[in-house]
Image (spheres, helix red, strand yellow):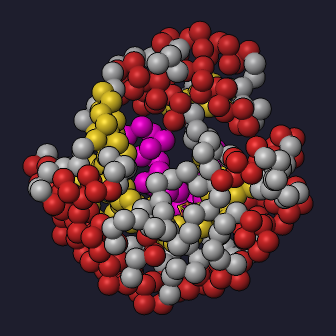
């Protein structure tokens, strides 16, 4: 069996106002202490994976900002991964990078350590909006970081957001055009969301910021999509575009509802028919591992019905949709029979299309994907 592995680095230089990930500029433990615990977790999992004959074919180091670690810390983490994980030949190995935290020595360490794909958090081309979002870099720094990474890595992805406070449709289109000129291989294009509990949410509540209207947001999404397609990108997932051969294999594991193992503070796993979430308590995480035990985790057993619903909900994010044949192979059931009522309702509304191979979102369904997903979820 092949497995995707995610590794969480919870450190950042500052907290962006929209961020609800487990990341902080001021954690109680130093990165060195955290990495010691993480390496123990890798060692404990290593035995389990090798005994089960599992091969890891994608590794994704995210956060947080992994590149706030020093070059020496990055080197030691990558070497622990190489020693402990049963890596497949041709493993896709991604590291998330934020502009302003990468330099030549770190890029060299990443490449020497086996990393072959970089996801760079550019987000926008306007310095005022970047500052408003709490990003700790300028557009010029993003461009420098991209050029530096291009010297070391073949596969580069940029992360870009739209529907930002004060942003107009024309601004968002300009951002996409400008970044296409850099010739990235992969483009993640997300609409900003005000997650509960974030500073952004507070500022919106207080009326200090406003977001673009729904109509403007939709136009930004549509125009961005058209520009990306005209530059040779394939739209392969709701928010993701790739040049041929550059889809993110790691994230495809999530969307295809395949197993993955998450290591680190608060990391999620889907593994042996359970969903797990490691503790978010840093001292508990570290102390358990230093005592030789895996960190405590919340465990949610996934029954077959839920697995099938998740497979629909996640698979419909992909523009290829959910293949009837693949669903049949996995569950020994025909999804057209199993979800006949849901499919009927959604097809009537024009939100999905079916051909002889698969079910997928229609053009009309793309911006209304959440309504479609909700139809498949009963638990
Ligand atoms: S850099 Fe990324 S992980 Fe860190 S605070 Fe900003 S959005 Fe969150």
Rendered residue at 60%/19% (across/down): 375
- Dividing the picture into quarters, in which one does residue 93 lie? bottom left
Q: Nearer the viewer, residue 365 or 128?
A: 128
Q: Quadrant of ligand 1?
A: bottom right
Give the side of residue 81 with respect to residue 360, left or right.
Answer: left
Residue 64 visible in rendering: no
Q: Is residue 306 magenta?
A: no
Residue 78 horizontal/vertical position (percent): 30, 73
Q: Quadrant of the N terminus?
A: top left
Residue 302 visible in rendering: yes
Q: Is residue 254 magenta?
A: yes
Rendered residue at 73%/59% (across/down): 228
Residue at the far bottom: name it.
105
**What's the magenta region?**
238-260
Residue 197 horizontal/vertical position (percent): 60, 45
Q: Nearer the viewer, residue 107 or 231?
A: 107
């Amino acid at each position: 069996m092949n497995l995707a592995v995610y590794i969480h680095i919870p450190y950042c230089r500052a907290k962006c106002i929209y961020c609800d990930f487990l990341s902080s500029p001021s954690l109680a433990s130093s990165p060195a202490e955290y990495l010691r615990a993480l390496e123990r977790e890798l060692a404990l999992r290593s035995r389990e994976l090798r005994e089960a004959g599992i091969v890891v074919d994608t590794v994704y180091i995210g956060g947080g900002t992994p590149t706030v670690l020093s070059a020496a810390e990055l080197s030691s983490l990558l070497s622990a991964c190489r020693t402990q994980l049963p890596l497949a030949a041709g493993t896709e190995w991604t590291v998330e990078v934020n502009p302003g935290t990468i330099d030549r020595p770190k890029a060299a360490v990443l490449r020497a350590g086996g990393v072959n794909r970089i996801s760079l958090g550019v987000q926008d081309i306007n310095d005022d909006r970047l500052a408003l979002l709490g990003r700790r870099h300028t557009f010029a720094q993003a461009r420098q970081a991209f050029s530096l990474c291009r010297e070391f890595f073949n596969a580069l992805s940029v992360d870009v957001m739209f529907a930002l406070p004060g942003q107009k449709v024309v601004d968002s289109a300009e951002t996409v055009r400008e970044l296409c000129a850099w010739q990235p291989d992969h483009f993640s294009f997300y609409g900003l969301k005000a997650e509960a509990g974030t500073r952004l949410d507070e500022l919106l509540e207080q009326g200090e910021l406003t977001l673009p209207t729904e109509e403007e947001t939709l136009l930004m999404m549509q125009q961005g999509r058209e520009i990306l397609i005209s530059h040779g990108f394939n739209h392969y997932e709701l928010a993701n575009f790739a040049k041929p051969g550059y889809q993110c294999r790691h994230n495809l594991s999530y969307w295809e509802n395949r197993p993955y193992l998450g290591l680190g503070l608060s990391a999620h796993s889907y593994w042996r028919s359970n969903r797990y979430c490691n503790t978010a308590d840093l001292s508990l995480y570290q102390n358990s591992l230093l005592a030789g035990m895996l960190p405590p985790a919340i465990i949610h057993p996934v029954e077959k019905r839920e697995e099938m619903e998740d497979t629909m909900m996640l698979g419909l994010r992909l523009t290829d949709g959910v293949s009837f044949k693949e669903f049949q192979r996995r569950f020994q059931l025909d999804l057209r029979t199993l979800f006949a009522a849901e499919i009927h309702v959604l097809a009537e509304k024009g939100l999905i299309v079916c051909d002889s191979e698969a079910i997928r979102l229609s053009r009309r369904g793309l911006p209304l994907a959440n309504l479609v997903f909700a139809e498949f979820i009963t638990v």
